[in-house]
Image: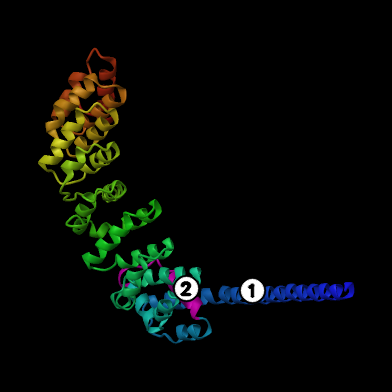
Amino acid sequence: MIKTELSLVTVLLCGFGLWIIGMFAVALIRSLSWQKQNQRTRALQPQIRQALVAFLAGSDNQDRLREFVQISRADVGAALVSFEGTVAGGARDRLCELALELTLVHDWCEETRSRNALVRRTAFARLSFVCSYEPCRRLAGDLMLRAIEDPDDEVTLSASRGLVHSSSIEVAERVFGHAVSKNLLVRIVLTEDLRRHAVSLCQRAIPRELKSGDRVRILNTLHMATAWERALPMPGMGALLSSDDREVRMQALQLASLVADAPEVRTGILDALADSDPEIVICAAGAAALQHLEAALPALARCLRVGELEVARAAAAALAEIPPRGWVTLRELSTSTNDVTARAASDALARMKVPE
């Protein structure tokens, strides 16, 4: 009995030992393979990039590039996409057309179906680059549309960036609706990419989000619209400027300085200047300054006379941005017996170098 048990243990130990040796052998083979691949990549990349530079310079000879494709399609694809951020316009279209002719775009479309997350992310990132070119966008469009709902944030970000190159406002609206529900990093990236569609998004997508009743989506929409730093037609601003939600109201006031002048915007700014919350008053003063809102002069003068130091400084800075009446008000208040008022007015006049 004991001998049988010992024999069984011996067999198990031998099997375990063989398994360890096998795993070590597999790891060693993979390591050698990766080493060889890395060495080949280091040798090929400079040559491929040189051939691509010649191609971008006007050469129509693709023989050298096709030779590299036969050696390593992956390295040619990586070298081609490495020009992202350094080429634009016709040069970028030329690269994208080359990717199509070398059937690299087809490879990336196939790789989007891989179970390997890294392979999928790389494929979508490369498709995002070439989707600035209409023929590539037609080939990969359906894949990119489905991918914006992918559970992998890196995949959805790449897909969204590829889609914003489309001239279709419906596609831009879908990407925008996706962006306002995502994290800060995704929103920052897509805000810049969506800038070109800002005015069009104000027609349906932005009003729809602002009326959604979802506080997070409303705030994210306001943040993105503010980051565009453009004069935008923003219907429905009156409700946001009088919102009971303090954060929504403050963000709306920041956006109010950029939107097209409208009665509801002016009213919202004037009401906020009379608010008891110092931070809301400060935001309203900044909006009044950027709108050059002369109707706000009496309210700004009152804030400068009776407000605390930070409020007085904000009001004085706003008055300095609304000449000439704002400058006249600052000169009068710079001689006030109230030290806070006089100091804030004098500092604002000095910063703006307002003539005596």
What residue do we see at 11% from left, 32% from top?
A: 295
Q: How many marks?
A: 2
Locate residue 294, reporting x and y percent: 13, 33
Q: Which residues are magenta?
A: 73-91
Residue carrying label 1: 35
Locate residue 39, reporting x and y percent: 61, 74
285 vs 128: above or below: above
- Residue 99, by quadrant, is bottom left
Which numbered tag is attached to residue 309? Answer: none
Q: Is residue 215 left or right of residue 85?
A: left
Which numbered tag is attached to residue 79? Answer: 2
Locate residue 241, reporting x and y percent: 20, 39
| Residue closer to the observer: 214 or 167 | 214
220 vs 39: above or below: above
226 vs 101: above or below: above
Q: Is residue 57 left or right of residue 296?
A: right
- Residue 27, by quadrant, is bottom right
| Residue closer to the observer: 19 or 236 | 19
Sequence order check: which comes first, mark 1 or mark 2? 1
Helix, strand or loop under label 2: helix
What residue do we see at 66% from left, 73% from top?
A: 31
Type of amino acid at the residue the image marks with label 1? Gln
Q: Residues within 10 Å of mark 1 (few under 14, many from 20)?
A: few
- Asked if the stretch drawn in magenta spans residue 342, the answer is no
